[in-house]
Image: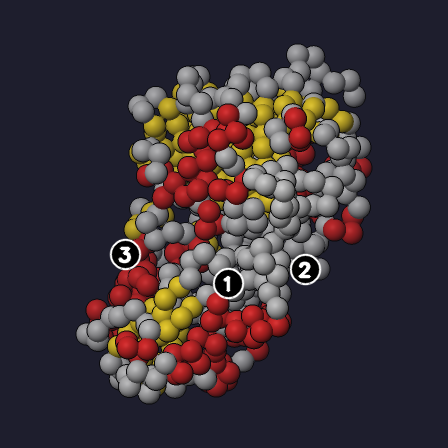
Amino acid sequence: MGADSAGGHEPRHGSIASFPPATFDPEADRPHDECGVFGIFAPGTQVARLTYFGLYALQHRGQESAGIAVSDGDRIHCHKEMGLVSQVFDEEVLQRLPGSIGIGHTRYSTTGSSVLCNAQPIVVQTPYGPIAVAHNGNIINTRTLRQRLEGEGIRFESTNDSEVIARCIGSLHKGDIVRAVRETMAEVEGAYSVVVLTPTQLLAFRDPNGIRPLCVAALNGSDFVVSSETCALNVIGARLIREIEPGELVVIDHDGLTEYAPVFPQRPAMCMFEFIYLARPDSNIYGRSLHAVRRRMGHELWNESPCDASVVIPVPDTGIPAAIGFSEAARVPFSEGLIKNRYIGRTFIEPDQRMRELGVRMKLSALKENLAGRKVVMVDDSIVRGTTTGQIVKLIREAGATQVHVRISSPPVKWPCFYGIDMADRKDLIAAKRSIEEIREHIGADSLGYLSLKGMLKAIGMPRDRFCHACFSGDYPIPIPKDLRVSKFALEGQNAAPAPEGALLDGHGRAGGHAGPNGRVIQIEGLKDPIPA
């Protein structure tokens, strides 16, 4: 399971080694969120297993790497690897993560490349003990903060913005972790939902605009859970208390849950793509069921873009609720027309040219008996780059559909996201350079209709000023520096020096702590005395 020198994986059985997944990704035309975070405080309980199940429920938020850090009251134990949650953790690993406080992370990279050193949680040693940090979002002043910290002699191990948060907290930690976090929140700009683990505490906080979701829940009466989404609460039997407010800090320890008022409160700006695609349909945000909201989006989509059709089909899975709603409003039968191969994902088998040409056929197959001789409405949640929608339309036509009408339950994506969704280059957004009619011609549909921003807000039932809709409107809630060009590799040129094998770096850039056998579990001693400057 531990990474070897070639960057591969040790086999669990036999002698055949496996290597990192190829870059082939049938989901390439989807927006991708950076990650999901999870935290639990449950004295007397071994929390690694519960954290595993929480991350499993958040797997849709990131599939590149996964990690868990736990505290036994003195040390922080951490394991993280490239791959899915089920690939990174097994019984042996979970047994090696003892502790009753824990945080977990599953990642899709938007800043920092997809390599092990960028996996989270990130563990930092401070003069007052170790901390572990997991982050969802994207920081827009990463470069400035990193340069300042490097100027103070702090050395970085990775190229992601999450380590900047962790190092910032570590550098400000003078014995009061709450103060260090609040000072960090005042310095960091952008979108962030963060969980922090100390040997005795669990902390959770959001950016002042609340762009990324984060909630707190009760478990077994006296224990607490924090999670990116409510769907991860159900699987472990936790009960939602509420969403953490934008700019709020929540501290959980043996004294219970303590709330700290928002730092520099701003207007709420929850990402609208959480409602459209990113969050699971069985989650709730702003007290609303996302499945119900997406069905209402389908209702509004029919009201704005009706068409003559004999069957409504979704692009599975995320197009299903809106397609149901469209069918209900149009009084046209809903049916499955596309079957999804749920197990192809990011394949470990290098695709040959024939497989690449097959493209979407590796992910979807058409049900000819439901499509042949019919006028089809195909409902999907979004078109970002426009690289796969045309292939799906062609697939439906080849199955015998006489007409294919495409309906999208969100507005055209015209502007890049700087807050944690992987669509940061405007030249790659098809709606930024083509009209709706030109997109229709490009994908080969008989007609194309998008849901308007007004219709989407009506479906959610909340006003425009409660959301970030910059990817549709160009109206960014946090000003973006003119020279900022966020990419996954924005920090790669800064020569982040890797730590020695088996070592961790403290907040002053020195190696500290030690790795467990085979580098699989990292243990950091809780320091009793401050490290001298």
Separation (CA) of disc 1 from disc 2: 24 Å
Q: Is residue 527 left or right of residue 45?
A: right
8 w.r.t. 171: above or below: below
> Which mark is first along the chain, 1 or 3?
1
Residue extending farthest to the top is 528
Separation (CA) of disc 3 from disc 1: 24 Å
> Which mark is first along the chain, 2 or 1?
1
Q: Position of residue 251 (x, y in %)?
A: 47, 26
Residue beneath the point at 64% across and 37% down: 2
Separation (CA) of disc 2 from disc 3: 36 Å
518 w.r.t. 439: above or below: above
Q: Is residue 396 left or right of residue 152?
A: left
Residue beneath the point at 33% across and 83% down: 401
Which residue is label 3 attached to?
292
Q: Which mark is residue 353?
A: none
Residue beneath the point at 39% across and 56% down: 275
Q: Which amino acid type is shown beneath numbered disc 2?
A: Arg
Q: In this view, does 515 lie to the left or right of 374?
A: right
